[in-house]
Image (cartoon, rainbow, N blue to C red):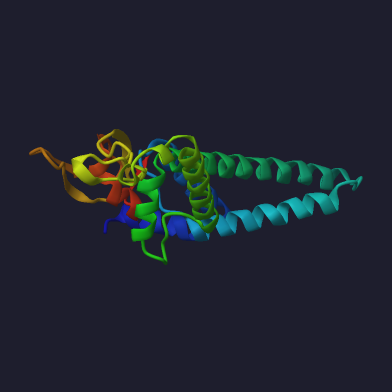
Amino acid sequence: MDIDDILAEVAVDTMPRETRDLQELTRAWVAERIAPEIMAWPGELMERVLARVGRQIELVEDQTGNMDPKTNFRLIVVQTEVERFKFLVRSFLRARLKKIDTHPFHILAKHTESDASHPLLSPAEYQYLTSHQALLAAHYGASFLSQFPNSLQRMDDTTGGISMVDKPDEDAAVFVRVLRDVGEVAIEGTDKRLDMKRGDVWVVRWSAVRGWVGSGDLEVI
């Protein structure tokens, strides 16, 4: 660990929790909008953010009508901050729901395989996914699937060497910034190795760096 790493850790430790949460939420939002795969649900971060937004909304409601100019100015600042958090949360959730709608069976399988302590989906997202797929299955069954043989009615069939499950493009190119030195990263299927050092920016296959992005060593930009 060099002096830059030590200074970076000190800066993070002295940074207010609200500022750190905003940075983490912004990074999660950017990653979710750019990464081809859905990212793991940041449960602890979202709990803190939503709780803070709720408290700020209560503060605005309680103080609305106060004629003190200083209080009114403070409320304007609080409302601006609330709207910034609300925009990030809404856009973040929309990006995740779009991926759930596009690759439902793939995401459901990944969620089932994920660690219970770090699930891929939130409880609400999992409920949405299962309910949405149940409605689609009932609609397709009533419309046309019921006319097919039983062996051809499954929408997640993988037999015969052809998979009915749509998957994201894991080899899509993404831009990443190196937050911590990770050393050499091998690109599967090629003989290329990238020496990733803190501060570098690379364009690389998602499949080669998703583990580093998940661990926080790289960030998608």
- Image coordinates for residue 141, horizontal then vertical, percent: 46, 41
In terms of image quadrants, where is residue 58?
Answer: bottom right
- Image coordinates for residue 22, horizontal then vertical, percent: 54, 48
Relative to 175, residue 75 above or below? below
Residue at the bottom extreme?
117
Q: Which residue does the image show at 7% across and 39% down from the upper left? A: 191
Q: Is residue 13 visible?
A: yes
Q: Quadrant of the C terminus?
A: top left
Query: Residue 198 versus residue 124: which sits nearer the camera?
Result: 124
- Image coordinates for residue 145, horizontal then vertical, percent: 41, 39
In terms of image quadrants, where is residue 18?
Answer: bottom right
- Image coordinates for residue 216, horizontal then vertical, percent: 35, 52
Q: Is residue 93 left or right of residue 103?
A: right
Q: Which residue does the image show at 31% across and 55% down from the upper left? A: 3
Q: Is residue 212 left or right of residue 187?
A: right
Q: Which residue does the image show at 33% across and 39% down from the upper left? A: 166
